[in-house]
Image (cartoon, rainbow, N blue to C red):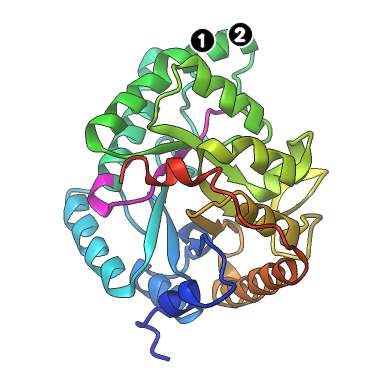
């Protein structure tokens, strides 16, 4: 099979295929140019890419960013690939502090840097016709109470929601271990507190569920289902927020993918291994094998017909 030909169509329409599309994150391919990354992923059978904005693949603030976006959209069309936009770039906004500034910064001007970045990500997503833009709350600054941090979120997140509404884009809040919004329950609470806008959904990282979710990966996915817009796939141990290849942690991958099938999730489920670019092609191959086998194992034993719990947000703004 030619590397420029995606097998995702035959895979997605074959009997027993999952209702969601398997993808891979570009933050796990930082030693490859973006075009080459897409070639490798298509060759390995991926039908989607999770694009992390920033170095080295697509700087949203570059002078020719809009030209790059248009070219990338054409390339994705040629490959038949779906795309989600990720915003977890480590040093894009501050060259000295990872993931800074955040929504929670006490300095209004610094927090505005994060807001403007996410609004720009929304514009990029619109140009790419992306499924959603994924984002996080940030770590609570020292000396700031959880209540004060929450008030900052309530004041700042709606600005991004409004921009997303203007551009017909959905945004998905990702709970992160150690951040103010740490669990699916936190994300759902914030969504409700800002008025339950249709544009705002949830990203679930399956590995994070091992670390922080009180009801595990299945409970987290069932809770998030009505608003689930994006899924990240990786392994973890319960003792550390460290993204690991499948089999190196404690995630029950078959249960996780099976639960996605059960709730009728039809979005992108993309591998996220941001510290493993040194073996990107090998991990892309092994990850596809692991996910395919995990799905097959669940399909062979589970007799539950998929529900449509999560189908509404998948179609909401298309």
With respect to residue 237, does 23 lie above or below? below
In the image, which disc is placed on residue 151?
1
Structural crowding at the residue carrying mark 1, measured as other residues with C-alpha within 10 Å and reported as few (<14), some (14–19) or many (≥20): few
Residue 162: give x, y in percent of width and height: 30, 24
Between the C-alphas of marks 2 and 1, the distance is 6 Å
Q: Secondary structure under badge 2? A: helix
The quarter of the displayed image where residue 16 is located: bottom right
Which quadrant does the N terminus fall into?
Answer: bottom left
**Is 142 on the left-hand or right-hand side of 110?**
right
> Label 2 belongs to which residue?
147
Mark 1: secondary structure? helix
- Which range is magenta? 126-139
As for residue 135 lying within the magenta part, the answer is: yes
Query: Badge 2: few (under 14), some or many (20 or more) residues near its Cα, within 10 Å?
Result: few
Tell me whether the residue at label 2 lies in contact with that at label 1, contact meaning CB atoms closer than 8 angstroms. Answer: yes
Task: Give x and y (percent) for residue 152.
Answer: 48, 13
Question: Front-most of 161 and 282?
Answer: 161
């Amino acid at each position: 099979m030619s590397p420029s030909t995606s097998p995702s169509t035959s895979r997605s329409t074959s009997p027993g295929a999952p209702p969601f599309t398997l993808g891979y994150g570009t933050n796990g391919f930082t030693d490859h140019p973006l075009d080459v990354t897409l070639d490798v992923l298509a060759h390995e059978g991926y039908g989607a890419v999770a694009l992390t904005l920033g170095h080295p693949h697509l700087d949203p603030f570059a002078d020719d960013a809009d030209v790059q976006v248009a070219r990338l959209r054409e390339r994705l069309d040629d490959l038949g690939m779906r795309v989600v936009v990720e915003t977890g770039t480590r040093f894009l906004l501050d060259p000295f502090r990872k993931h800074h500034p955040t929504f929670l910064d006490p300095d209004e001007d610094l927090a505005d840097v994060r807001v403007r970045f996410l609004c720009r990500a929304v514009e990029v997503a619109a140009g790419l016709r992306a499924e959603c833009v994924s984002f996080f709350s940030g770590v609570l600054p020292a000396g700031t109470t959880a209540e004060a941090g929450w008030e900052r979120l309530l004041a700042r997140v709606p600005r991004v929601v409004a921009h997303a509404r203007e551009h017909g884009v959905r945004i998905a809040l990702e709970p992160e271990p150690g951040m103010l919004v740490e669990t699916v329950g936190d994300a759902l609470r914030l969504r409700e507190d800002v008025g339950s806008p249709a544009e705002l959904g949830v990203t679930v990282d399956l590995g994070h569920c091992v670390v922080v979710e009180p009801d595990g990966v299945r409970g987290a996915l069932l809770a998030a289902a009505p608003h689930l817009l994006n899924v990240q796939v990786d392994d973890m141990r319960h003792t550390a927020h460290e993204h690991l290849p499948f089999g190196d942690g404690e995630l029950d991958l078959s249960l996780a993918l099976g639960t996605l099938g059960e709730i009728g999730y039809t979005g992108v489920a993309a591998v996220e291994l941001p510290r493993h670019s040194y073996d990107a092609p090998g991990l892309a191959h092994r990850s596809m094998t692991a996910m395919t086998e995990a799905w097959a194992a669940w399909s062979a034993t589970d007799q539950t017909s998929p529900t449509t719990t999560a189908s509404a947000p998948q179609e909401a703004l298309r």
